[in-house]
């Protein structure tokens, strides 16, 4: 079993999983933009962000979807075949399920390389002027997708755990700073 | 005879999508019940006569495999077909589900045709809804 996945492989897996889910469930074709690494999260976000924790035998990580509120409504409208022009429970639930499907499919690919992998239940956040950060300083791989006029970002962070860490964690802790 | 179904998924979005798929299928569907996890599903099973169960695996409180185990251990429910619909695609989980008595397995993302075909195979109905 390989124990290292390079960035290019992760990007390829993210693109494959995202395209499969968006085309099958939303009948939506996407163009992926240039991926990039990010160690400092963007300040004062607006929109919808969802997180899923991933954990393996020797590593742990987080998968994240992020979009504007308008884009989240567009995606939910296609997913649920109903019109949504503002973020409500249906939109948040659809966004969480998209996260579950995309990161879940990615997990199936990652398992082939890194062995059995656990997936947490998604957490979804909506708001204006908020920031998110992990308690660890880590680097995220960001893969943007253009879906028509909408932008959806898939963010991944996978890290090897300390070899003598005895506890199994279901995802990294996240700290959310909410301000008015 | 119309079939009464139970959809078990912690995502209301997936429950809605499955409801829509089932109602469009050319199958004699009766009541469609919903549950958000295995615990709620057991309560629905106790209170209703259910012909088919469509269930997610990864859910809080009681997951789909635990639910499947409880259904197969109950004399009244053990013959109910249980279809698992999940992002969980690992060979280990698929084999575990089959070993525990899952009737079918559909991976998310799914097309309406995949759901219809699985159910049509069980009911003998026309799947082209």
Image (tube, coloured by chain):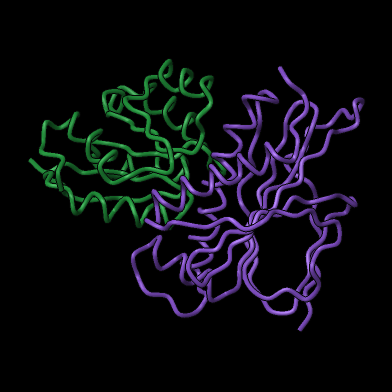
Chain colours: A purple, B green
Residue found 53% across the figure and 26% down from its top: B90
The part of the image, by quadrant, that contains residue B4 is: top left
Q: Quadrant of the N terminus of chain A?
A: top right
Give the quadrant of residue A119. Answer: top right
Q: Is residue A15 above or below residue A45?
A: above
Q: From the viewer's perspective, tell me whether residue B98 is left or right of residue B127.
A: right
Q: Which residue occupies the foreground of this view, A16 or B72?
A: A16
Viewer-closest of A71 and A176 = A71
Work out whether B51 lies above or below A125: above
Residue occupying the far left of the picture? B1
Residue at x 62%, y 41% (from the top left corner): A12
Lateral position of residue B7 relative to residue B108, left or right: left
All told, the count of numbered labels is 0
Point out the residue furthest to the bottom here: A180
Q: Nearer the viewer, residue B61 or A14?
A: A14
Residue B109 position within the rendered picture, expressed as x and y whole percent measured from the top left: 42, 44
Give the x, y percent position of residue B59: 53, 42
Q: Is residue B45 above or below residue A32?
A: above
Q: Position of residue B9 (x, y in %)?
A: 44, 47
Q: Quadrant of the C terminus of chain A?
A: bottom right
Residue B83 placement: quadrant: top left
Query: What residue is shown at x 59% (from left), y 62% (from top)?
Result: A152
């Amino acid at each position: 079993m390989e124990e290292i996945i390079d960035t290019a492989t992760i990007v390829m897996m993210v693109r494959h999983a995202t395209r499969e889910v968006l085309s099958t469930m939303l009948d939506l074709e996407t163009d992926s933009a240039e991926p990039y690494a990010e160690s400092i999260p963007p300040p004062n976000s607006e929109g919808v962000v969802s997180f899923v924790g991933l954990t393996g035998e020797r590593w742990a990580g987080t998968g994240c979807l992020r979009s504007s509120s308008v884009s989240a409504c567009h995606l939910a409208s296609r997913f649920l075949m109903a019109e949504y022009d503002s973020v409500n429970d249906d939109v948040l639930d659809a966004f969480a399920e998209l996260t579950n499907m995309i990161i879940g499919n990615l997990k199936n690919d990652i398992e082939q390389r890194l062995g059995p992998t656990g997936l947490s239940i998604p957490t979804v956040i909506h708001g204006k002027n908020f920031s998110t950060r992990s308690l660890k300083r880590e680097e995220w791989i960001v893969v943007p997708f253009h879906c028509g006029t909408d932008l959806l970002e898939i963010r991944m962070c996978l890290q090897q755990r300390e070899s003598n860490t005895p506890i199994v964690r279901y995802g990294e802790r996240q700290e959310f700073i909410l301000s008015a | 005879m119309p079939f009464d179904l139970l959809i078990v998924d912690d995502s209301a979005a997936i429950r809605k999508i499955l409801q829509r798929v089932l109602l469009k299928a050319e199958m004699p569907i009766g009541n469609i019940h919903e549950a958000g996890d295995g615990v709620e599903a057991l309560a629905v099973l106790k209170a209703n006569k259910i012909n088919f169960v469509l269930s997610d695996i990864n859910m809080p409180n009681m997951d789909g495999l635990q639910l499947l185990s409880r259904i197969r251990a109950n004399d009244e429910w053990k013959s109910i077909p249980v279809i698992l619909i999940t992002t969980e695609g690992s060979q280990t989980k698929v084999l575990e589900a089959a070993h525990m008595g899952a009737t079918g397995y559909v991976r998310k993302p799914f097309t309406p045709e995949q759901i219809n075909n699985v159910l049509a195979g069980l009911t003998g109905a026309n799947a082209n809804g």
